[in-house]
Image (tube, coloured by chain):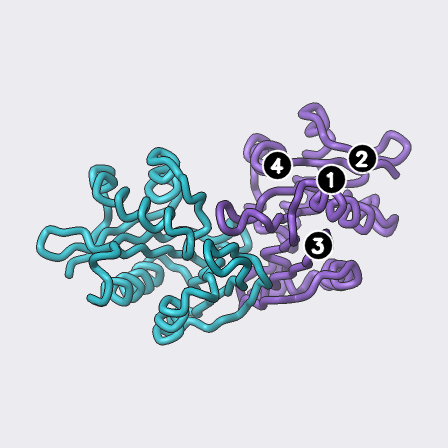
Chain colours: A purple, B cyan
Amino acid sequence: MDIREATREDFERIWPIFKEVAQAGDTYAYPRDIGKDEAARLWMDAPRKTYVCEADGRLLGTYYLKTNQPGPGAHVCNCGYMVASNARGRGAATAMCEHSQEQARRLGYRAMQFNFVAASNETAVRLWTRLGFATVGRLPGAFLHPSRGYVDALVMYKTLAP
Amino acid sequence: MDIREATREDFERIWPIFKEVAQAGDTYAYPRDIGKDEAARLWMDAPRKTYVCEADGRLLGTYYLKTNQPGPGAHVCNCGYMVASNARGRGAATAMCEHSQEQARRLGYRAMQFNFVAASNETAVRLWTRLGFATVGRLPGAFLHPSRGYVDALVMYKTLAP
């Protein structure tokens, strides 16, 4: 498994993963009918860095890293990770999260924050917890899940050792 | 005291307030040296609505209202309020926060969230608490205060009665 910075050309292979995740509507705060251009803007242009995770020439997943708040909050970064549905269970999310923490330290960030983790996304919550993230906030009913209705969203946070 | 939607022309009078607040660096996550055009983009263009609070023809304060997260989070709004330093203690913040909750309900939002309240900003924390906001999250050391160093940032949240 190899993780490297994404190029603009990679977006052709990122888009099917993004589309699948957004359409499911149960993990990310993106419109379910988001278009390709807007997705490219959010995933490739707005972040500070975007990465892809590959194995045997195949794209397993992707993540972005960005500054979570400007000015007095600029020492904390935010990341988002997506794994192709047919590539789950191979450790891509773990590998990308660990990679992102290294990159974040290298870029000088002191902490990493996830702003909006659906509490119903138990796989993700368990994984981030195992990787050292603490649940530091709970937003009551802030996430409208497509089948469960309003569920809480969690704020998760990890201070990065220098 | 009168609160109304801001026009683009109002920004000439908003900018001195914005600049003063950003330069102080102790409340908002904006770069302290932010320029006028970027401020206009963030305060006038990016939000869904921007308002001004006036008395006797003078601008006391301003606030914006926006959707905090798209898609599954789009029923929760976010607001930010600024009061001119020489207009403090007249209840402008309270009036704007109450006004914003009415506007939010009218626009169909079910909750209001403040993402990044410096815990050192005790006046604000006390005020939002009095106005019904709960502290639902605490981000350790997420706010770099100009004199106190790294202080916690709070996430505050209020469910709006329909």
Residue for badge 1 = A62
Residue for badge 2 = A59
Q: Position of residue B124 (x, y in %)?
A: 37, 66
Residue for badge 3 = A160
Q: Position of residue A23 (x, y in %)?
A: 63, 46
Left or right relative to B30: residue A153: right
Which is more foreground, mark 2 or mark 3?
3
Q: CA distance from mark 1 to mark 3?
A: 21 Å
Looking at the image, tell me whether mark 4 or mark 1 is earlier in sequence order: 4
Q: Residue furthest left?
A: B56
Looking at the image, tell me whether mark 3 or mark 4 is earlier in sequence order: 4
Q: CA distance from mark 3 to mark 4?
A: 18 Å
Which is more foreground, mark 2 or mark 4?
4
SS class of the residue under badge 3? loop
- Nearer to us in this view, B104 or B97: B97
Which is more foreground, mark 4 or mark 1?
4
The image quadrant of residue B43 is: top left
Q: Chain of mark 3?
A: A
Q: Chain of mark 4?
A: A
Looking at the image, tell me whether mark 2 or mark 4 is earlier in sequence order: 4
Look at the numbered discs 1 and 2 and tell me whether their residues touch, using CB distance below 8 Å. yes
Left or right relative to B159: residue A112: right
